[in-house]
Image (cartoon, grey):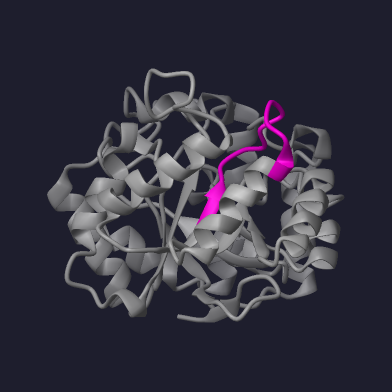
């Protein structure tokens, strides 16, 4: 495993992070989730990412159980707040009441006294940014969160949040956007602004929800045991399942083979070539997926390889910065 500093901070995280967005508490049983977490730990992954809303709060509970007994100081534990976690009007958003209450609930479910990174899961246009950042600052001063991050904020929002954080004496050190060979909307604006503000990217869906593994082929039904073949989990990726896009992805296979990499390793290595990316988040339903993915850490792709990838994918790549936070 290789490691990188997160933003302009002293926090070091693993280049490959383990996340449980669509798996724990939903797609896989708890025994399988525990096996995947153990595989991640055995492979040298120290960074674990979740959110209060995943699987209706169950994902945090499963992760907390899976990490039970692990020396707390040996891992970096991240979670998020924003989406609804209850029926009430204050059970959502980035108002002070929801942030504080959600943080306490997350800590209980994760069985820990603090998280290393607490992230605003989206930008809340209905709440003053000062209220949001002040609530985060209070959690930092109380030792319940060590650092603050955001997810899917645009460049202007990141700049404003980072400036206000500095005024409050805390650090905004990360953004968690969707980023992959196929989805590059952060490159024109978010990445340059983040570099200026001392913010790193912790990217989700670096495999485009499994599309870039090459397991899905044009004109064929997805494997029954795959994410796309899962009735619930597969709903979020239907827009990827276009024959023209799947055909381009298959054309990446010779590039991976020439480098001695799996398709997944090539995709993960690609996002890690961006030096503003501190980590790529992987999910897994089987331990062998974890073991394959971690081999991407430390891989360098030269300019010729990057150019070949761009040529293959062509106009299937989305680059519009206006699509930040909108999804593929």
Q: Quadrant of the C terminus?
A: top right
Asked if residue 303 lies in the magenta stretch, the reply is: no
In the image, what residue occupies the spot 65% across and 76% down? 9
Residue 31 visible at all: yes
In the image, what residue occupies the spot 66% across and 49% down? 133
Total number of numbered labels?
0
Residue 141, x across and y down, in percent? 53, 65
In the image, what residue occupies the spot 64% across and 34% down? 245
- In the image, residue 277 sits, relative to residue 179, either above or below, namely below
269 or 150: which is nearer to us?
Answer: 150
Q: Quadrant of residue 87?
A: top left
Q: Quadrant of the N terminus?
A: bottom left
Residue 152 visible at all: no
- Residue 179 appears left or right of 16: right
Asked if residue 125 lies in the magenta stretch, the reply is: yes
213 or 189: which is nearer to us?
Answer: 189
- Which residue appears farthest toward the left when viewing the image? 31
Residue 254, x across and y down, in percent? 59, 59
Residue 172, x across and y down, in percent? 67, 61
- Segment colored magenta: 118-130
In the image, what residue occupies the spot 79% across and 72% down? 303
88 or 321: which is nearer to us?
Answer: 88
- Residue 186 appears left or right of 237: right
Residue 45, x across and y down, in percent? 39, 72
The overriding secondary structure of the stretch rendered in magenta is: loop
């Amino acid at each position: 495993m290789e490691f990188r500093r997160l933003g302009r901070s002293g926090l070091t995280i693993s280049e490959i992070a383990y996340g449980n967005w669509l798996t724990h508490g939903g797609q896989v049983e708890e025994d399988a989730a525990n096996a995947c977490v153990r595989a991640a730990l055995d492979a040298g992954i120290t960074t674990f990412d979740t959110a209060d809303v995943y699987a209706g709060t169950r994902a945090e509970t499963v992760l907390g159980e899976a990490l039970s007994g692990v020396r707390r100081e040996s891992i970096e534990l991240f979670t998020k707040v924003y989406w609804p976690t209850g029926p009430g009007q204050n059970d959502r958003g980035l108002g002070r009441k929801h942030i504080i209450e959600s943080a306490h609930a997350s800590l209980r479910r994760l069985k820990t006294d603090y998280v290393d990174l607490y992230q605003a899961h989206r930008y809340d246009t209905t709440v003053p940014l000062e209220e949001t950042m002040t609530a985060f600052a209070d959690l930092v001063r109380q030792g319940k969160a060590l650092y603050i991050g955001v997810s899917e904020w645009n460049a202007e929002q990141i700049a404003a949040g980072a400036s206000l954080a500095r005024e409050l004496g805390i650090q905004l050190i990360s953004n968690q956007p969707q980023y992959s060979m196929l989805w590059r909307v952060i490159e024109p604006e978010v990445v340059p602004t983040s570099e200026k503000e001392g913010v790193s990217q912790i990217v989700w869906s670096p495999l485009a929800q499994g599309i870039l593994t090459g397991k899905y082929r044009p004109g064929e039904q997805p494997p029954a045991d795959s994410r796309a073949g899962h009735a619930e989990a597969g709903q979020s990726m239907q827009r990827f399942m276009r024959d023209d896009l799947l055909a381009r992805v298959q054309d990446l296979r010779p590039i991976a083979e020439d480098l001695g990499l799996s398709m997944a390793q090539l995709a993960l290595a690609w996002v890690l070539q961006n030096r503003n990316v501190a980590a790529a988040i992987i999910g897994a339903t089987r331990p062998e997926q974890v073991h394959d993915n971690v081999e991407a850490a430390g891989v360098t792709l030269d300019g010729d390889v990057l150019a070949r990838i761009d040529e293959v994918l062509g106009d299937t790549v989305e680059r519009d910065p206006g699509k930040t936070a909108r999804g593929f």
